[in-house]
Structure formats: C-alpha cells, structure tokens
Image: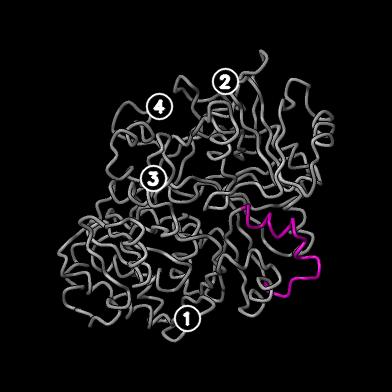
Amino acid sequence: MITNVLEYLENSAAKYPEKTAFADPASHCSYQEALQASRSIGSALLPFGQRRRPAAVLIDRDVCSVLAFFGIVFSGNFYVPVDPKLPAERIRQILKTLEPFCILGSEKQLSALTSSLGETGNYPLLSIETALQTEPDEAALEKIRKTHLDTDPLYTIFTSGSTGVPKGVVITHRSVIDLVEQFAVAFDFQSEEVFAGQAPFDFDVSVKDIYNVIRNGCTLEILPQSFFVMPKKLLAYLKERQVTTLIWAVSALSVLATLKVLDKGVEAPLRKILFSGEVMPMKVLSYWRKHLPEAMYVNLYGPTEITCNCTYYIVDREFTELETLPIGKPFPNTEILLLTEKRTEAAPGETGEICVRGTSLAPGYYNNPENTEKAFIQNPLNPYFPEKLYCTGDMGWFDKDGLLHFASRRDSQIKHMGHRIELGEIETVLQSLPFVENGCCIYDTAAGKIVLFYQSRENEDKSILQGLQKHLPKYMCPNRLIHFDRIPMNSHGKIDRARLKREFLTGGETL
C-alpha cells in the first residue's frame, strides 16, 4: 500500500534508474539522479528542524523546481510553489499567510526576491545550488519516513480569494495517490508515455504531470512558456522528444487551434490529449480531432480543492459547435452530489450545485478557517456522522445516461430585464462563431448590462450580434461589446475575469 508519493519516485528509480525522468530544453535528469538530488535537498533542510510545515519554492519551468518539491517532501514537510514574477504585494500576502520555515530558489531568484520585496522578513533562504551539494543523511531521512502518514500535507497551491487575499489549498499525499491510481486505470498510462508539461508549477494541472509520470515510470518534458508564442518550435520539440501525452489547459489547445498550427501535420506520436480548466469550445476540439483523429480526447473537470479532477469524459462521438461536452462521470472513490439552494438533493434532470465527497477533498485552506468552513461543509444529506463535502460553486445536471454536464458558475446566473439568464449559454454561442478566437460574458450589476469581451483579428461587433441573435432571444444579447486583439489572461492561462471587471465594469467591480 502506497502511503507516500516518494515511493513512486523510489520504485521508478529502482526499475528505470537511467531513464530520463524530467527534462527541460536546457537540462535533464534520470530517475536515479532525481532521487539522489531530492535526498540531498531534503538533507539540506533537516537543520531547520521542522515537520509538516510549509516551505516556499520560487519556481521556474525547469527540472530544479521539481527536485525542490521532492526534497521538501523528503524532509518531512510540504512545498508551496510561488511564481517569483508575481507582483511583490501578492508574494507578500502569500508569505504572510504561509509563514514558511524556508524559501528555496536559485541564487538568482533569491537575490531578485530580496530586491523586489525590500526584505524577506524572518524567512530563511536556501539556494538550490547549495542544497544540491549536501551529502544525503540517509539515516535521518529514513527516520522521518517512519513517522509519515498519508494524511500529511504534500503541497499547498494558492488560488484567488474573493476578498483579494490568496487562499492556500492544502493537499495531502493520500489525495494525490488516489488521483494518479485512478488516472492509471482510466487512461491506461504506461511507462513508455512521454508527457509534455504545459502548466506552470503553481497551477494544479502540473500536479497531474509530475505524479502520473513518477507513478508510471514515464518522462516529463517541461515546456517553456515561450514555445506557445513560437508554435512551430513547439511542434518540432514535441516531435524531437517523441511526446505522446498532453494534459493541458483548454486555453493552450485553443491557442494552437487559433494559429492553425496543426495544418501542416503533426509528427509527434500524440496518443492521449487530456484537457481541463475551462469549457472546451467545440470548434477547437473539432480542429484537434480532425488533425489527430486516432488520439484519445478526455474532458477533465474539478477545482484545486478536490485534487485536480473529480470527473472525466472520454470523447466518444461527434458534437455540433453549439453543443457542450459532458464533464462526464466521477472517478471511482469519488461521489458527486447536486444540491439545491436549500441544500436538498436536486431532482433528476434538475440543475444543482456540484458538490464532491471522497478521498480527493483537501483538508481545507491553510491558515484560513473562515473560508474553509464556508467551502467544506457537513454533508446535509447525512445528519448521522461527520462527513465533509466541497461545494464547487459550479452548477451542473445529470443527463439520462448519468453523465454530468457543467451549466455555469453559481454566480453567473443573472436576473436581467426580468429574465433569469445563464451567461455560459451566451458564451457557448459566442465560441461557436468562426471569427471569434476567445471570449466571455460578465454582468455589470451597477449598470444593469451584459458585457461581452471577445478576441478576434478585427472588430466584429456587428457580426457577433447577428450571430447571437440567430440562436438567442433578444434579452440575452449583450448590451456592450469590447474587442481585444489579445484578451487578458491570468497566469494559469484562463481569461482574467477579475481584471476585466476591475478595468471595464462600472465601479471597477472585482471578484
């Protein structure tokens, strides 16, 4: 029985010691090298004398970031990825909430952080370069392992908070182990797989890359962000590294489809393409399926708080551009409940809030009991013993085949001109228009207007309104359209709705 994710790394190092475990364009390491380097970093952290405490890692899209994660876990603690390119004030907020016992990073990153913040408070700094030179203390590391529990934290990832203060989602070893064991069965991952990591390490999509790779003895190719503005170079790299598997954000697949990158053929042996993060536009999926018809396509759904994904749908038929993909069925060992506003179970076919129970649930938010209590509630359908549900804030419904469908965010259902409107329905029609590359709708409550933001090569206001009016009643059509050559995106590759609200809505509303 696996109780610590490090067992995956150790098992793969025993089976495939010389095989490349992690690589980026500038470096690579074998499983045996990754194991030894991680033990060195873990030993360098031992003098701090901490257990089950957070250590911050200044991340980059490189092998060293992953080794730092494993090193922290070897020390009996848990890691927190922090993008050093974040605004200084946001980094301060994260560190204030976290109070890490140490900040790890390259010497260059640590120097830049100190300069940016003006100071780093009482947080000790440790450079990766120094840590890698430390002789592993095998006896001390073994002693730590003997006291480990699978409920110990593995990592914390910070997400946006409704008050403007980031929330740190704590995830345990047990939850990640459950995730990758279910993935291995559902998607038949084999040791021959080569993953291409698109997501930054402070985005939970990357968790699926790292831990599916070490669980199955695969290879992870870590892609630099620059490849997504040089798509020809990206395709050449996927071919060169013989990539078979993509677990990407929908936005990344959309970028390549918009640029028609696959039109000249795909020579990489891509067999499995899994995506999540946002609703997949049908024209994007159709483009990929046209050029890679033999690949498996999987729609994944789930927020960070339930350890990446709780449902999946393997695409098994053609869809029209006005349809939306099901988000599918729950993974084994996970249950989805749909609850009404009165916290009763939704009737068959009725839309309700998607709530999740099972091993995948996070214990809560780090150093944030108030928000934890709001989001992780006692199961209202079970009054007999303590049982937590996570309330996602997403609305969904089950079809006659038992497949779950995403309807909208709970806060995206609006009352406009006396009508209840799901903004997601407008967005589905918008995404079906061939000249629209990306877009979203936000309701300006103060002005009483539906505002549509879209990305296209030229201003298409008139054509968009004509297209929407073919499928939607007049009262659902937007009152204001805002065109972008490139719509603002956040660091996780999603449309930056918070920025759009702040900059374009009446009164500068924020999430």
Nearest to N terminus: mark 1 or mark 2: 1
Closer to the camera in the image, 253 or 187: 253
Quadrant of the rendered image containing residue 78:
bottom left
**Observer-nearest residue: 294 or 454?**
454
Task: Report the magenta residues as a range.
Answer: 250-269
| Mark-to-mark CA distance, 3 and 1 | 33 Å
Q: How many labels does the image show?
A: 4
- Amino acid type, mark 1: His
Residue linked to disc 4: 381
Quote the CA–CA distance across marks 1 and 4: 50 Å
In the picture of the structure, the residue carrying the numbered disc 1 is 28
Q: How crowded is mark 3: few (under 14 residues within 10 Å), some or many (20 or more)?
A: many
In the displayed structure, would residue 59 be above or below residue 447? Answer: below
From the top left corner, tell me how far across and down residue 460 is, in percent: 81, 40
Q: Residue 384 carries which label?
A: none
CA–CA distance in space, label 2 to label 3: 36 Å
Task: Give the distance between the C-alpha atoms of the residues marked 4 and 2, in whole angstroms.
Answer: 37 Å
How many angstroms separate mark 3 from mark 4 (CA)?
17 Å
Q: Which amino acid does label 4 sit on?
A: Leu
* Residue 258 colored in magenta in the image: yes
CB contact under 8 Å: marks 3 and 4: no
Q: Could you tell me if the residues under marks 3 and 1 are in contact, i.e. CB atoms within 8 Å?
A: no
On the image, numbered disc 2 is attached to which residue?
Answer: 446
Instruction: Say if residue 334 shows up in the picture.
Output: yes
Which residue is under mark 3?
361
Residue 1 seen anywhere in this rendered image of the structure = no
